[in-house]
Amino acid sequence: SNVLIAIAMEAEASPFVNHLNLTIDKSFFPPESPFQAFRGKHNSCDLTVITNGKDTVLNTNVDNVGTVPAAVATFLALQKLKETDPAHLLINAGTCGGFQRKGAE
């Protein structure tokens, strides 16, 4: 099966990407977009983790957060996967800072 996981910030995605030994796929998104995709396998699943990337317009290097970058990145990822092997599951793993508010560190 094919699983797509959308995570807004690179810092949120990094532990997950590293734990599963996913590798960056620079050809996944159009080169003009700031979005990033990390891909690999876990057991019998093909995994794709996407992030919204960093600001490249003003060169602030700040994570692109919010509903618009998330929606565009997710749409483009679903379209890309549809070409070869459509996603069977989409997970939006954003936290919106909610973990710290509940006492997590």
Image: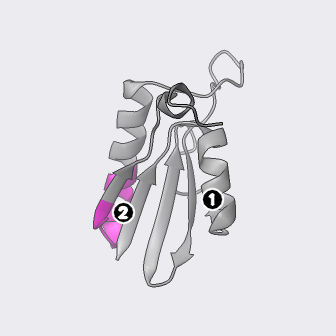
| Distance between mark 1 and mark 2 Cα atoms | 19 Å
Mark 1 and mark 2 lie on one chain; the one further toward the N terminus is 1
Left or right? Give the position of 59 relative to 68. right
Residue 57: which disc?
none
Of the pair 30 and 36, the residue shown nearer to us? 36
Identify the residue under disc 2: 81
Q: Secondary structure at mark 1?
A: helix
Numbered range of the magenta stretch: 77-89
Residue 45 position by quadrant: bottom left
Q: Confirm whether the magenta stretch covers residue 82.
A: yes
Identify the residue under disc 1: 17
Residue type of the residue flagged with mark 1 = Val
Which secondary structure is most common in the magenta stretch? helix
Label 1–label 2 contact, CB within 8 A: no
Left or right? Give the position of 35 relative to 88. right
Q: Confirm whether the magenta stretch covers residue 94.
A: no
Q: Secondary structure at mark 2?
A: helix
Q: Position of residue 83 (x, y in %)?
A: 32, 66
Residue at image coords 71%, 20%: 59
